[in-house]
Image (cartoon, rainbow, N blue to C red):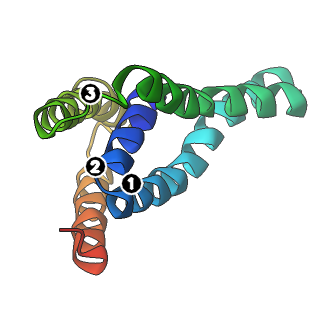
Amino acid sequence: HNFPEGLITFVATLADPRVGAVLAVAISIHNIPEGLCVSLPIYFATGNRMKAFLWGSLSGLFEPVAAFFGWLVLASVVTPTVYAVLFGWISGMMVMICVKEILPTAFRYDPKDTVVTHSVVAGMAVIALSLVLFAVN
């Protein structure tokens, strides 16, 4: 999912640098636990800190690669319609990743739903609060 994140950050920055900056900060914050989720299993499986660090870093490198790809392909053709289609397409991809992969996995590890639903609602609250605080129009 890092490729769509990088692409959408690039497209958002093209359309409105302020939106792009807010999105880049949000994705950067989200990349910290994501990097840990990639690195920790590798570290515990191999005991090798460098290997864990390198794989965690490699997973994050797809975002700037996607931004560069977006610049190569889209920089001269981004219109409001292209912008809308890309945002819809990438948002749909991210929602499907959550619905089809992340939530079922979370429920598999929490079959009695002691924390998953509360965590989803808390995440939604954080998103709503960030929309109010940053007031990106």
Q: Which residue reaches farthest bottom?
A: 133
Q: Which quadrant is home to the C terminus? A: bottom left
Q: Is label 3 or label 2 in front?
A: 3
Please rate how many residues cluster around mark 3, counting C-alpha atoms within 10 Å: few if below 14, some from 14 to 19, many from 20.
Answer: few
The spot of residue 24 in percent (x, y) is 46, 53
Cβ atoms at labels 1 and 2 below 8 Å apart: yes
Looking at the picture, tell me which residue is in the foreground, 132 or 83: 83
Q: Which residue is mark 1?
A: 20
* Helix, strand or loop status at disc 1: helix
Q: Is label 1 or label 3 in front?
A: 3
| Alpha carbon separation for disc pair 3 and 2 | 12 Å
The mark total stands at 3
Residue type at mark 2 is: Ala
Q: Which residue is mark 3?
A: 77
Tell me the residue at 30%/71% (across/down): 130
**Marks 1 and 2, the one that precedes in the sequence:** 2
The spot of residue 135 in percent (x, y) is 23, 75
Q: Which residue is mark 2?
A: 15
Q: Is residue 67 above or below residue 121?
A: above
Residue type at mark 1 is: Gly
